[in-house]
Amino acid sequence: MTKLFEKIIPVILNNEGGYQKIASDPGNWVGGYKTGELVGTKYGIAGKFWGKQYDIPNLTLQQASDIYYRHYYRPMNLEGLKSNELVLQVFDMGINAGKRLAIRKLQQLIGAEVDGYCGSETWAMANDYHINVGRDLVKDYKHARIVYYEYLADKYPERYGAWINGWKRRVAHTKL
């Protein structure tokens, strides 16, 4: 694990919280929503995706950190970004809304090719954003996250409406 990952993972784990087993949350079910087994989510590691590989109620912080590093952080390839705060924001959105979506949102903001993969073009354009655009990229990215979450809540109120306030708090409190 990298030093930057070790610096930001406590923020992520705090955002995700401990164990919960809410029946109305589709992410808590292994094998199908309300048709499978209700196992819950711990540290944001959802039973839906990880419940066949891990004992979710007894998942350790180390196991959760390893999952985040191997399956989210490394594939997102964010360490070419100079701003640790931006890395944290993009990584957090990747966990919350999907890795490629989080990177596509960044690419849309900076005017890079929107392909959902972070590499040299994305790094360069993000790193020079304040010079080229004259704005704070972290602030703009946080705003883009809120706009996206509001869109989901407005378009699918029965599915996402209950989560919007928590998502907004999450964005506001995600910082080093």
Image: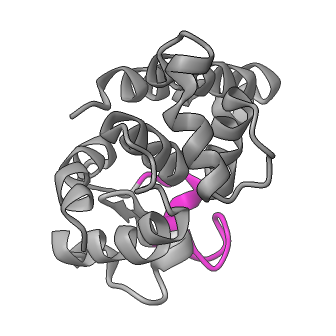
- Tell whether 42 sits left or right of 93: left
Picture quadrant where residue 66 is located: bottom left
- The answer to whether residue 24 of the structure is visible from this angle is no
- Viewer-proximal residue among 98 and 28: 98
Residue 23 within the segment the image draws in magenta:
yes
> Closer to the camera, 83 or 49?
83
User: Where's the C terminus, which quadrant?
Assistant: top left
Q: Say if 72 sits above or below 122 in the image.
A: below
Task: Check if residue 39 falls in the magenta segment.
Answer: no
Residue at (80, 46) in percent of width and height = 114
Percent position of residue 118, x then y: 61, 56
Q: Quarter-wise, where is residue 170 in the image?
A: top left
Q: Position of residue 4 (x, y in %)?
A: 24, 56
Name the residue located 53 percent from the left edge and 11 percent from the top edge: 135
Rendering colour mode: one colour
Q: Is residue 32 left or right of residue 38?
A: right
Q: Position of residue 39 (x, y in %)?
A: 42, 71
Q: Is residue 137 above or below residue 83?
A: above
Judge left or right: residue 157 versus residue 56: right
User: Image point 60% across, 56% down: which residue?
Assistant: 120
Q: Position of residue 115 (x, y in %)?
A: 79, 54
Quadrant of the snapshot with the N terminus: bottom left
Q: Which residues are magenta?
A: 22-38
In front: 122, or 37? 122
Which residue is pictured at 68% across the width and 37% down the height? 105
Is residue 7 something that shows in the picture?
yes
Residue farthest toward the top in the current orientation of the protein: 134
